Amino acid sequence: MSSDAIAIQTAEAAGRPWVARLHEWVTTVDHKRLGLLYILYALFFLVIGGIEATIIRIQLMHPHNDFVSPQVFNRMFTMHGTTMIFFVAMPILFGFANYLVPLMIGARDMAFPRLNAFSFWLTAFGGLLLYFSFVGGNGLYGAGNAPDVGWWAYAPLASRAFSPGHSSDYWTIALLASGFGSIGTAINIIATIVSMRCPGMTLSRMPLLAWMNMVMSGMVLLAISPLTAAQIMLLVDRYLGGHFFDTQAGGSATLWMHFFWIFGHPEVYVLIIPCFAFASEIIPVFSRKPIFGYPVMVGATVCIAFVSMSVWAHHMFTIGMNSYANSFFTITTMAVGVPTGIKIFNWLGTMWGGKIQFKTPMLFCIGFLFQFLVAGLTGIMLASSPFDWQLSGSYFVVAHFHYVIVGGILFALFGAFYYWYPKITGRMLNENLGKLHFWLFLIGFHLTFDLMHIPGLLGMPRRIYTYEPGRGWDTLNFLVTVGAFVQGIATLVFVANLIVSYFKGKKAGNDPWDAWTLEWSVSSPPPVYNFASTPRVASRRPLWDLKHPEDPDSRYE
Amino acid sequence: MVCLIIAESAIFTIFVVAYLFYVGKSLSGPTPREVLQTPIFYTVCLLSSSLTIHFAGRLLERGRRAEFLAFWLVTLILGALFLYGTGQEWHRLIYEHGLTISTNLFGTTYYSLVGLHAFHVTVGLILLTIVLLFGLAGSVGPEQSRRVDVLSLYWHFVDAVWVIVFTVVYVLGR
């Protein structure tokens, strides 16, 4: 049945002119196509953001380098940060959520397909708007084009007086648009999970990926909305002459910092929780054991979500809050380490005593585990406010959060690509190229971000476009740049693998990894209607029950 | 809709926090004590519209369409009255007291908070009007009552926000 469905699809697709197929993709409301659009769109911006990172690193390779001007350098780090967070990480995770959640809970589609398409196109146009600033940001002022106020856009730097022209407005409106898109998608994911689970799939039998995406969506609602509100205030200030963040009229620059970080810190967890979800699906399959401590895992996720809402001001220890606030935010920040530690032990517990298969997805997940742990440890260091007073705004912080975002989020994402690519395209990614990608990226990553901690400890501030020779930063910065290039090459290997395997990869079949969740029960790629008949579920591993009727999980749950 | 309300509440929370943070921080006049008058009549209008929309929903459930439309129309009128009240207050503040969004911090926070709420009222009124038009065309029956309930949930939310905005702006803020 399933192979017939594929044959019909390809025959139809071949027969139609490309305009019709393009029209189909643009007007689609199918969760799988939208998921793919999200992912492809994010990959495109990943390349752009990567090029910006490379420009930053080339500039910092030697002291007194003049590869780009200071103005361009400011634009590069602003655009790099904004792009990577809002137009790479968020859409790629939403893409996976869109693609996988309905398949995993046995649903036909998302709850609101048209809202889904609307959200995607809002995000997409947000990204285009941001990049249009390179062309259209100049205005009449001749005051530079792309936004250059940093991805925090701290007041009063983002006010009219210090950021003339329209560059910051592009930043604001792009984020506003994509923010509405994110809220739409989050509403959609929650509604889908709450009301469209297949018969038998109780909340306690739901795959962890669905659980964590639901928690993530809840956090998006509470975290993105403050950003939206703050952006509206910034627009009022810039266009209507308001005084929210205008210190000359009694306004407060600190308030912007609070509003931004009330969004900014939960955002980190919005990004990392879906990555926990990938790890929680991939590690059990390649350890050949069910996940260890399922209920604790769910509890820890919810706990992280709650605690992470009250840690934001640890980004602001240096602004001179009183000692009570400092202690409060130090304690809450350290408290996040507890549920996170529980998760790490659960993943280790899953691997413990399992028959571990070191396939590429598993390799990336092991890298994720190790690096996320290190990132958490430097996080605990920075959580202590006296330590933070010393190192805030230094390269140590830059190294810390890249350790989270690249070492944690990106590694888990690569793992997810290798794991679900066969389901999405019907072909396996090449395993040798995958291993090459993994090892190259691992070496490049550690070369760049391990070493980046040291200039930070030696006092190198972030966001400087160049530095004096002879401070002990020179060699380290050079090696960091070399590492960045190694990562770039590894990413090219990955892209090549994606393209080559699409045409020449081994046929995957329905279930190449011998996995246990519902998405592997349908053909690869899944038919438009997902499930020919609505599945019924009796345990957390429905496919295990199907393959082992003599010893089903449902007997023990 | 519940999720949307959570997200909207977060947005309003930020604006309310900003308002409270800036109470009394304006460097120049006019101050809220000098210029604000408590809009009791229009507040009663808005709050009672929550009741009428609730009754309208119950009537629709039982299939009494004409009465549903009557209550729906009353809701619409009460909402429009409230919006008129806000408009009148703004007119008075701008023309008599010279308070605009760029005058001082009070102006900035007041107009953006009340304006954000008025924007939500406007959206609500548009949605109410659409349902009314469909109702007059005869295509709103008991089978749509759950959809109508979703809309009235939004309307209740707009009212509840006004209770908070009212408390903050007209009671605590003075």
Image (cartoon, coloured by chain):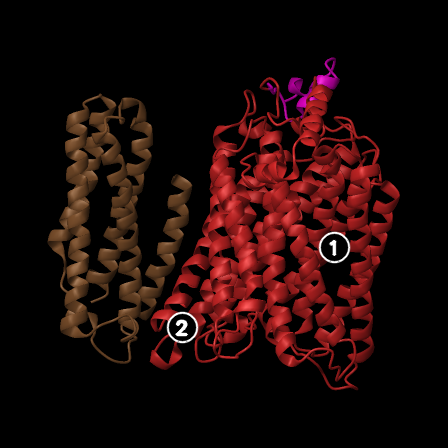
Front position in the image: A517 or A436: A436
Q: Is residue A256 left or right of residue B25?
A: right
Q: Which chain is brown?
A: B
> Does residue B129 show up?
yes
Image coordinates for residue A434, horizontal then vertical, percent: 83, 45
Q: Which mark is first along the chain, 2 or 1?
A: 2
Image coordinates for residue A514, horizontal then vertical, percent: 77, 27
- Quarter of the picture containing the N terminus of chain A is top right
The answer to whether dots 1 and 2 both sit on one chain is: yes
Instruction: Give me the residue at 46% from left, 59% from top.
Output: A227
Q: Chain of mark 1?
A: A
- Quarter of the picture containing the C terminus of chain A is top right
> Does residue A96 show up?
no
For chain A, the rendered hue is red
Q: Is residue A314 left or right of residue A509?
A: left
| Location of mark 1 (residue) | A371
Front position in the image: A227 or B145: B145
Q: Chain of mark 2?
A: A
| Callout 2 amino acid | Phe
Q: Where is A507 relative to B35, above or below?
A: above
A526 is within the stretch colored magenta: no
**Region in magenta:** A535-557
Dot 1 surroundings within 10 Å: few (below 14), some, or many (20 or more)? many
Instruction: Give me the residue at 35% from left, 55% from top.
Output: B12
Q: Is residue B49 left or right of residue B107?
A: left
Instruction: Give me the residue at 75% from left, 45% from top.
Output: A365
| Location of mark 2 (residue) | A245
